[in-house]
Image: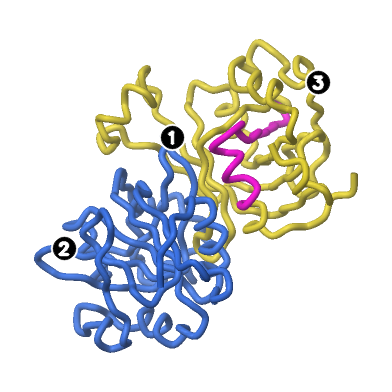
Chain colours: A blue, B yellow
């Protein structure tokens, strides 16, 4: 399937509903640890410092966190309709013990400009380079949020990725999850 | 003009291109300081803690910063085509010395659920309540960004607003900037 460039705003139109629904696939790879894929339901897209950015929230306990710290780049992938089981599995097992690509049949495919691969079966992709990083400050998180979001006190690190590439399958609109 | 509910994702489709173009209008009002409107070109939209959120970046030197700290809520407004001059003016003068509503002919109109008003002439609106706040950490900002974004070392505070309402004029699609 030929991939066509789309703007980050068009990517957002596809990605935001998926983010709230099935989830998106976040992939990061370092030379030492290789690639890992995890499901995300939280994220932000927009503009900062005049740069198109996608922001991901990753708990320090996650295997992806270790990889992201080494890699400094990531991809965000919109799954196609029908990939719900694979996406669900990527959100429940850890890449520390399992090769989730092998486990799910998802395949890493080369990116255009970053080290982290994309997911071949997905229909839209962002390639991002981390330009800023912060951490969620426990003391400022609303108490109402803590029981559901932080039952283990595992506050997210926040990675701001500059969007370097945004592209999609030509027919992605017909295959949205 | 009747306002119809839209989802936050539909709002994003209208707002993200405007954010990168003409700009959006951020309004905040406190009981003590009244309403102020400022133009924003930077912002993020998405999902955090299962909540729809819009994130704004406001420098401590801004009049809006003082109001936001008191108010705890804000609205984000997509201007209509033809409002470019007013939006430009709201980005260049300070509400500390000028009533920008009076100056531009823009009118504050009551919101549905927050204290901060919307801008009557705008075509799409978000009402947000601040649920989290952080500050840009100078030591982590890329050096390449500093000359253009922070020539005065005036690093942003970052306000995460939970989206409580998202609505638009029925014909907003034909009137986008």
> In the rendered picture of this protein, how many numbered marks are placed on residues?
3
Q: Which mark is residue B105?
A: 3
Q: Residue A93 in the image: x percent, y percent? A: 31, 83
Proximity of marks 2 and 3: CB atoms separated by less than 8 Å: no
Magenta span has B13?
A: yes
Q: In which quadrant of the rendered view does residue A71 lie?
A: bottom left
Q: Residue at x 30, y 32 (%)?
A: B138
Q: Which mark is residue A30?
A: 2
Give the residues drawn in magenta, as a range: B12-32
Q: Residue at x 63, y 15 (%)?
A: B96
Indicate left or right for B14 with B55 as reference: right
Q: Residue A45 in the image: x percent, y percent? A: 48, 52
Indicate left or right for B27 with A45 as reference: right
Q: Residue at x 74, y 57 (%)?
A: B6
Q: Which mark is residue A50?
A: 1
- Looking at the rendered image, the disc whose residue lies closer to the viewer, 1 or 3, is 1
């Amino acid at each position: 399937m030929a991939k066509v460039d789309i703007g980050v705003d068009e990517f957002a139109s596809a990605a935001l509903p998926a983010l709230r629904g099935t989830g998106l696939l976040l992939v990061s790879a370092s030379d030492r640890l290789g690639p890992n894929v995890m499901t995300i339901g939280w994220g932000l897209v927009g503009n900062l410092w005049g740069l198109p950015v996608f922001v991901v929230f990753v708990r320090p306990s996650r295997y992806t966190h270790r990889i992201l710290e080494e890699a400094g780049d990531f991809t965000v992938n919109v799954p196609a309709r029908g990939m719900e089981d694979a996406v669900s599995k990527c959100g429940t097992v850890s890449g520390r013990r399992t090769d989730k690509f092998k486990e799910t049949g998802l395949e890493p495919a080369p990116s255009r400009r970053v080290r982290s691969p994309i997911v071949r079966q997905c229909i839209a992709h962002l390639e991002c380079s981390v330009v800023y990083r912060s951490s969620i400050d426990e003391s400022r998180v609303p108490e109402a949020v803590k029981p559901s979001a932080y039952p283990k006190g595992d506050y997210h690190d926040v990675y701001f990725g500059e969007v370097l590439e945004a592209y999609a399958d030509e027919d992605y609109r017909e295959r949205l999850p």
